[in-house]
Amino acid sequence: MIQRIQTIYLVVSAIVIGALFMWFPVVIGTDGSVIMERSEPLIFGLIFISIALAIISILSFKKRQLQFVLNRLNIISNFVLLGVFVYRLLTLSGETIVSEKGIGVLFPIISIVFLVLANKAIKRDEDLVKSVDRLR
């Protein structure tokens, strides 16, 4: 059933990461050099992997265990993306640039929260199915 609550959580997670890609700022240093932008292979790859895992997880609604594993992989990729953002922002010089451009770090955190909520809902569904199977 695609209309379960975890599907909503996964859609919100994919939208949040998609919004990160759309509105990701180009971080420019004090000397005018580009420090971080969304077209970098590492950042683009992690954002693409996160969106792809969320979509694949939505489409595999009949296989709850696979959905659970895909969500865990998505959480790991979001943590790596968060780590890249934090590392890059901490290596910047100048306080005003960090405080203006650091808002993008919140998007992977919001995505992780929705992925954890989706995993809890998947676990609840799996426990319900197992309890019904015991009664047969």
Image (cartoon, helix red, strand yellow):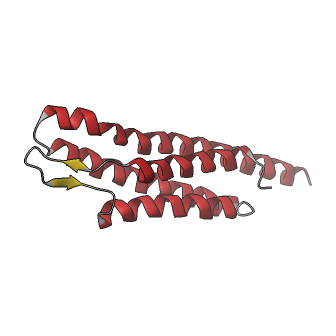
Query: Which quadrant would the N terminus be assigned to in this image?
Result: bottom right
Q: Nearer the viewer, residue 73 or 82?
A: 82
Q: Position of residue 71 (x, y in %)?
A: 55, 55
Q: Residue at x 31, y 64 (%)?
A: 42
User: Which quadrant of the figure has residue 117?
Assistant: top right
In the rendered structure, the answer to whether residue 133 lies left or right of residue 6 reads right
Query: Which quadrant would the C terminus be assigned to in this image?
Result: bottom right
Q: Position of residue 37 (x, y in %)?
A: 28, 56
Q: Nearer the viewer, residue 105 or 72?
A: 105
Q: Residue at x 12, y 50 (%)?
A: 32
Q: Where is 78 relative to 63, above or below?
A: above
Q: Residue at x 10, y 41 (%)?
A: 93
Q: Position of residue 135 (x, y in %)?
A: 90, 50
Q: Where is 102 relative to 135, above or below?
A: above
Q: Nearer the viewer, residue 102 or 122?
A: 102
In the rendered structure, the answer to whether residue 58 lies left or right of residue 72 reads right
Q: Residue at x 26, y 44 (%)?
A: 86
Q: Position of residue 127 (x, y in %)?
A: 73, 47
